[in-house]
Image (cartoon, rainbow, N blue to C red):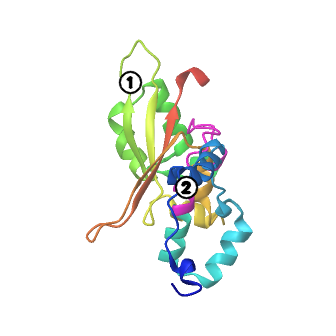
Amino acid sequence: MRAGSAKLRPLHPSSEPMTNKKQPAAKKIIDTPAVRAENPFLNTGFYTRMRDYTERDAAFSKELKAIAEHGAGKQNSDARLAPSLQVLRGVIKKGLPLEDMLGRIVLGVESGLWAPWLSGFGFELRGVNYAKTEARNARLALDISLASKANTAFANAGIPNWRSLVAQDCLQLQVEKPTEKTPAKAYAIFTLDASAN
């Protein structure tokens, strides 16, 4: 046997299972508490700088990804009270500001007009209690997609990162990824809580 040939021999397998070496790393991941991802687009200055060198569609995709990773903030989900919707509540369409429309829904007045009224602002009426004897709570979905009808009102008010701000207040987010035939769709879910009067 030549000198040094022992070095070429395969080592004997360890008596310990190979998975023991990987367990500490896995345990460390499990023991680490889940932290919500930060959404940098909440900062208007950051958003504006990003838009200086990013095209509109790409900017929307980046912001939507950050919104989805951060999740719904649930800071104030009643559409009549949410600070992020203040600009939208003051906009007048079909002769009424959104604020008055939301109040009429809670009061149960002119129920046949609720859905068309809301659609002009980018809202869908996803559920409502029509019973005359009970509180009129409702679920509203605000379209935060690229072509949202709400975009104009926020742009006119100089709030480019409105989607991120709305996501901080809303109760829930629904994000649908784009396909070959359809663009990405996203909704921020708000409520009308009659008990908040």
Q: Quadrant of residue 114?
A: top left
Amino acid residing under circle 1: Asn
Residue reaching furthest to the bottom: 2
**Residue named by callout 2:** 69
Residue reaching furthest to the top: 133
Would you say residue 102 sits in the magenta stretch? no
Residue reaching furthest to the front: 1
Q: Nearer the viewer, residue 2 or 88?
A: 2
* Number of marks drawn: 2
Q: Nearer the viewer, residue 101 or 85?
A: 85
Q: Earlier in the sequence, mark 1 or mark 2?
A: 2
Q: Position of residue 86 (x, y in %)?
A: 64, 48
Q: Quadrant of residue 105?
A: top left
Vertical comparison of 12 with 105: above or below: below
C-alpha separation, residue under disc 1 versus residue under disc 2: 32 Å
Q: Position of residue 79 (x, y in %)?
A: 55, 39
Looking at the rendered image, the disc whose residue lies closer to the viewer, 1 or 2, is 2
Residue sitting at x 38%, y 63%: 184
The span picked out in magenta is 65-84
Residue sitting at x 25%, y 70%: 181
Amino acid residing under circle 2: Glu
Q: Residues within 10 Å of mark 2 (few under 14, many from 20)?
A: few
* Element assignment for label 1: loop
Q: Position of residue 18 (x, y in %)?
A: 51, 54
Instruction: Classify residue 36 as left or right of residue 105.
Output: right
Task: Tell me whether the residue at label 1 lies in contact with that at label 2, contact meaning CB atoms closer than 8 angstroms.
Answer: no
Q: Which is the main secondary structure of the residues drawn in magenta?
A: loop
Q: Position of residue 150 (x, y in %)?
A: 50, 58
Please state, as top left, top right, bottom left or bottom right, where the C terminus lies in the image. top right
**Residue named by callout 1:** 129
